[in-house]
Image: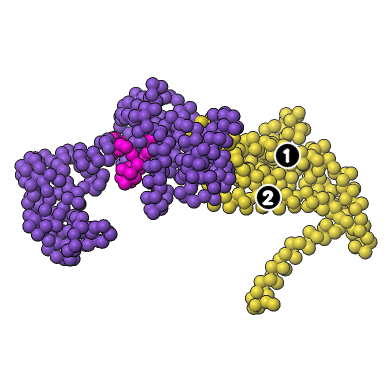
Chain colours: A purple, B yellow
Amino acid sequence: MTLNLTTTAKTFGDGTKALLPTSLKVNTGEIVSLLGPSGCGKTTLLRIIAGLETPDPGGKIWFDSDDVTDLPVERRQVGMVFQSYALFPNMSVRANIGYGLKMKKLPKADIEARVSEVLEMCQLNDYAQRAVTALSGGQRQRVALARAIAPRPRLLLLDEPLSALDAALRETLRDELAILLRKFNITAIFVTHDQNEAMAIADRVAVMSQGEIVQSGTPEELYRKPTSTFVASFVGSAMHLAGEINGSKLQLKGGEVSLPADGTGCEAFVRAENIQINKNGSLSGYVDTVTFLGTHYRVGISGVISEPITSIFSGNKVPKLGEKINLTIEPQSILLLPSKA
Amino acid sequence: MFRSKTKLLQLTVTLTACAFLLIPTLMSVLAGVTVNYFKGVSSGLTFKWVLNVWELYADSIFLSLWLAIACLIVTLIIGLPAAYGLARHPGWLSRLLEEFISLPLAVPGLALALALLQLYGTLSGFRTSWTFILVGHVLYTLPFMVRSILAVLAAMDLKTLEEGAASLGASPWQRFRDIVVPNAMPGILAGALTVVTLSIGEFNLTWMLHTPYLKTLPVGLADSYASMRLEIASAYTLVFFVLIVPLLMAMQWASARAQRIAQ
């Protein structure tokens, strides 16, 4: 199913503009992530698509060629996975998963067959008869997903589906979720504030800030070609090289670097893996911290700009704390982005 | 046996307090099955007085049971949707409404009865009907029903649960039936037992509202104390206990259960 959203906005009763007029298209089978910090409007956008919030007049929501703008949530045929999962405590795992099918008034045998199929897909067979209150966080998350997809919704919506889990589990379930969503072969939108989650699961990421989508693209596009300072620093945490730009030269506290082009009216950003420790480098700074991360070291360096910067180091000669080191930044690796007005 | 004198002292105080409360009760019950109270238990034990009570006051007992059931039905019909509405729309208006519903708890039963009499006393068909007492009982017990359900509903994320059901295609009525009511059940049960217990035991209001033809169990008890011999009044107490104590125990059990959920 294709989702098409045109100039949809949401103003709350107290005048807060939670969502500025937004357009979004999601193609059949595509998995799109809405990524942004809390309060950026991503959950509001998801709830509008679900039918849990009414958009301001003027906005339109299309599921294929059906205008669903005025349809209440119960008639939109969307599957929804909530942050808190919202499993029904009065029902078993099986009854939770079968609830949507029961609402469709399917024959009992069909419900049983479909529930069994979904239980199998989500590896929940052993828990079918359990009370949902007797499940672990990871199991609840899978039940929530199974319940949402059981009635074969036109669109699957997930609101921070992993944020209620602890860090270690989150990483495992992130990959599991990515595999499951592809197995279901369903159009899905999922909201998160965690860029790793967005990158791991989504085909396309729409980055949101202050009520609007600021950039939308594949994870690689967002990482390599951010169009704004916000996206550069939010996705992959690029560092702002604050200094004086003169044409294609950038003067920093710890030395001068060349820019890939004329940088007038721009701000320069660089990612940690593009700052190389090199004894012939034009920049100099002092080693503040060295953190061993298994495959590489993360080195915190002060004196290059007014704030500390981070470099990724994977050689053998580990820099010592307090040592003065030289650095190079390849001009091609510098992101030049228009400065905020 | 006792680890210290403090423990022994604690036990003594507790048992004394229990005895202070229980002995008069037991005396009263005993009086109800004694042939002649003034001669004491040596005169023999009998169920004569209990049978007498049954002959004289069976109507009162049935009226009280009937009133309690009617009161339960009415408070459920009003209280469940009210508690649901209050839980779904928290805010200052809901708080105010909740306080308003609870007002009959603060107003003495006599004053409430007087107000009802002033307003409806002249409607003779209504004044002499059992429904007049029912109105009083509903006013008095409704806050217990509403608060009991509200406490359980407020403890769960009702809004998200309902949104979950709605996204699965459930209409507002189906959501209420499949999600709200089953999950509110511990609160409903605790509220129901409280309402029935209170309605059966209610005296203040009922004393003012009753007519000679409409005496409830506690009003009958007062009547028997005033006009019958002590053995009959005591036997009446016994009957009252037999009816109310199991209800009281069930109510405590249900309330404790509902409170565990509400925490």
Residue under the point 89% across and 44% down = B55
- Residue extent of the magenta highlight: A188-214
| Element type at mark 2 | helix
Chain letter of the residue carrying label 1: B
Identity of the residue furthest to the right in this view: B43
Specify the quadrant of the image occupied by residue B188: top right
Residue under the point 74% across and 30% down = B126
Specify the quadrant of the image occupied by residue B118: top right
Which residue is labeled 1 in the image? B69
Q: Nearer the viewer, residue A169 or B103?
A: A169
Circle 2 Cα neighbour tier, 10 Å, few/some/many (<14 / 14–19 / ≥20): many
Which residue is labeled 2 in the image? B251
Q: Nearer the viewer, residue A252 or A184?
A: A184
Q: Nearer the viewer, residue A115 or B243?
A: A115
The answer to whether residue A16 shows anywhere in this view is no
Chain letter of the residue carrying label 2: B
Q: CA distance from mark 2 to mark 1?
A: 15 Å
Q: Is residue A200 magenta?
A: yes
Q: Amino acid at mark 2?
A: Met
